[in-house]
Every structure is written in structure tokens, then in C-alpha cells.
Amino acid sequence: MNDQNFKADYFVIKALEDGVHVIGLTRGSNTKFHHSEKLDEGEIMIAQFTEHTSAIKVRGKALIQTSHGEMEN
């Protein structure tokens, strides 16, 4: 990663059931899936947006905590 004072907040995803999918999407003109994780109930993933990741898709029941607040899906 290029060190151009790139700062991205971390966010937390906590699985509230088995089989929660966390999918990273790329930046650029063609958005593509580039990473996928499967979490089981109680597992926590700490992640951040980067120069390669512009969006995260969460499928399943999870608690998501960010600097902007907390949400449950």
C-alpha cells in the first residue's frame, strides 16, 4: 500500500448466527468480488477499507460496529 497518509477506520463485524458471509468488493470502474470470509456465531472480524476495497457486503445476521454507529442486519 502506498503511504500517502492513507487512513481508514476499522470496523467490526460480529456473527450472530453460523454462516455469516463477509464479501469484499474492489475499487475501480469494474467492481468485483475479491475476498470472502465465512463467520460462525460469536466470531468477530475486524476490517478496514483500503486502496483495493471500496465496499463490504454482509450476508446473514450480524452486528456491525463502525465509527458512524452500530447496526444489525
Image (cartoon, rainbow, N blue to C red):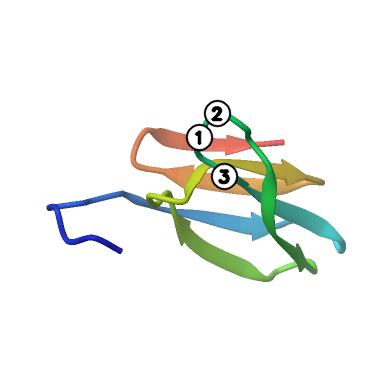
Name the kind of residue labelled 1 in the image: Gly
Given the current orientation, which residue lies at the most extreme right position? 19
Horizontal and vertical percent position of residue 50? 39, 52
Name the kind of residue labelled 2 in the image: Ser
Vertical side of 41 occupied by 67: above or below: above
Q: How many marks?
A: 3
Horizontal and vertical percent position of residue 37? 72, 65
Q: Which mark is residue 20?
A: none
Residue at 58 percent of width and 55 percent of height? 13
Gap in angstroms between the C-alphas marked 2 and 1: 4 Å
Quarter of the image containing the C terminus? top right
Gap in angstroms between the C-alphas marked 3 and 1: 7 Å
Name the kind of residue labelled 3 in the image: Thr
Horizontal and vertical percent position of residue 10? 37, 55
**Which quadrant of the figure has residue 44?**
bottom right
* Frontmost residue, 50 versus 65: 50
Given the current orientation, which residue lies at the most extreme left position? 5
**Which quadrant of the figure has residue 19?**
bottom right
Residue at 50 percent of width and 35 percent of height? 28
Horizontal and vertical percent position of residue 17? 83, 58
The reply, left or right, for residue 37 in relation to residue 4 is: right
Query: Badge 3, how many Cα within 10 Å: few under 14, some, many 20+?
Result: some
Quickly name the residue at label 2.
Answer: 29
Whether residues under marks 3 and 1 lie with C-beta atoms below 8 angstroms apart, the answer is yes
Residue at 30 percent of width and 49 percent of height? 8
Quickly name the residue at label 1.
Answer: 28
Asked which secondary structure carries label 1, the reply is: loop
Quickly name the residue at label 3.
Answer: 26
Whether residues under marks 2 and 1 lie with C-beta atoms below 8 angstroms apart, the answer is yes
Asked which secondary structure carries label 2, the reply is: loop
Gap in angstroms between the C-alphas marked 2 and 3: 9 Å
